[in-house]
Image: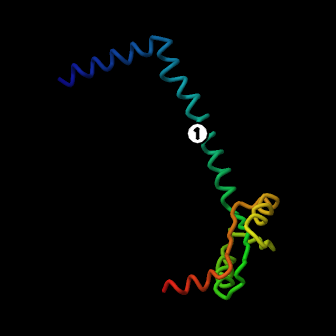
Amino acid sequence: MLRGLRSIVIKEVKELIRDPKILLGMIIDPLIMLPLMGSAVRMSMQSAIESARLVQVAVVNLDQGEVAQSLLTFMSQFPNLQLIYLNASSVEEAVGELERLNATELLVIPRGSVSRWRGRG
């Protein structure tokens, strides 16, 4: 049984090698396309990793409370996180400055947020 299968496989491989159209489509195209696709994926992954190395967060601290300050102190300990403090009086004003600074994130700590947080316990 296996002997017959082996001879059929050998016959088919010989036939594939003799036909130049199949040789081009089955062997040469993948040898060219796979390295090109691999390098494109590698370059896109490297650029994604580079952009994720440093995250800039614009902070608007409207509360100025003790818990808000401890949160910002905790966040400032991360080496890949850069906090940019904004002196904005509203969220709309902060969004305008966010576009100017080219920061990626905006953190707004609203007034009275500590009292609401303590009331949940």
Residue 77 percent location from the top left of the image? 67, 78
Q: Residue at x 69, y 77 (%)?
A: 76
Determine which quarter of the picture holds residue 66: bottom right
Q: What residue is rendered at 60% in x and 42% in y? A: 41
Image location of residue 110, percent across then percent down: 67, 76
Q: Quadrant of residue 63?
A: bottom right
Q: Which residue is mark 1?
A: 38
Q: Is residue 89 left or right of residue 7?
A: right
Q: Residue at x 68, y 82 (%)?
A: 73
Percent x, y of residue 29: 55, 24
Indicate whether 5 appears above or below 112: above
Secondary structure beneath disc 1? helix
Amino acid at pointer 1: Gly
Q: Depth check: 67 or 103 in front?
A: 67
Across and down, in percent, residue 25 comes to 50, 19
- Label 1 packing within 10 angstroms: few (<14), some (14-19), many (20+): few
